[in-house]
Amino acid sequence: MLTSLAAVVLGALALPLQSALVEGRGANPARLAMVTGVFNLLWATMSVLMIVRP
């Protein structure tokens, strides 16, 4: 569940925002930072749960 949610956040939000920022299409760097932070929290939570509850 967390893995698929993290994949959706990465594929639908983070990567398009990153591409827009690199190409100079007026993306908001703060929004990219927020979305990336959410992805990182989801991924870290999933990693901890994999270790604690194998």
Image (tube, rainbow, N blue to C red):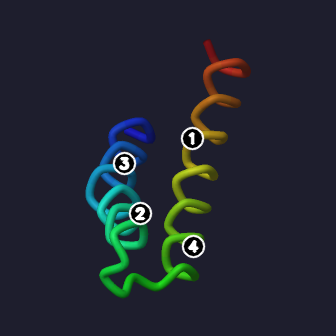
- Tell me which label, 1 or 2, sits earlier in the chain: 2
Foreground label between 3 and 2? 2
Q: Cβ–Cβ below 8 Å for labels 1 and 4?
A: no
Tell me if residue 26 comes above or below residue 42 in the rendering.
Answer: below
Q: Residue at x 70, y 18 (%)?
A: 51
Q: State the image coordinates of residue 54 (x, y, percent, origin top left).
A: 61, 12
User: Could you tell me which secondary element the residue under label 2 belongs to?
Assistant: helix
- Tell me which label, 1 or 4, sits earlier in the chain: 4
Q: Quadrant of residue 3?
A: top left
Q: Would residue 33 be found to the left or right of residue 3 on screen?
A: right
- Tell me which label, 3 or 4, sits earlier in the chain: 3
Q: Amino acid at mark 3?
A: Leu
Where is the N terminus found, in terms of image quarters? top left
Q: Residues within 10 Å of mark 2 (few under 14, many from 20)?
A: some
- Tell me which label, 1 or 3, sits earlier in the chain: 3
Q: Which mark is residue 43?
A: 1
Label 1 and label 3: CA atoms lie apart by 9 Å
Judging by the rendered image, the residue that carries numbered circle 4 is 34
Q: State the image coordinates of residue 36 (x, y, percent, origin top left).
A: 54, 60
Judging by the rendered image, the residue that carries numbered circle 2 is 18
Judging by the rendered image, the residue that carries numbered circle 3 is 5
Foreground label between 1 and 4? 4
Q: Residue at x 41, y 72 (%)?
A: 21
Tell me if residue 6 comes above or below residue 13 in the rendering.
Answer: above
Camera-nearest residue between 7 and 29: 29
User: Could you tell me which secondary element the residue under label 1 belongs to?
Assistant: helix
Q: Amino acid at mark 2?
A: Gln
Tell me if residue 38 comes above or below residue 53 in the rendering.
Answer: below
Label 3 and label 2: CA atoms lie apart by 18 Å
Return the residue found at the far front.
Answer: 23
Q: Residue at x 50, y 67 (%)?
A: 35
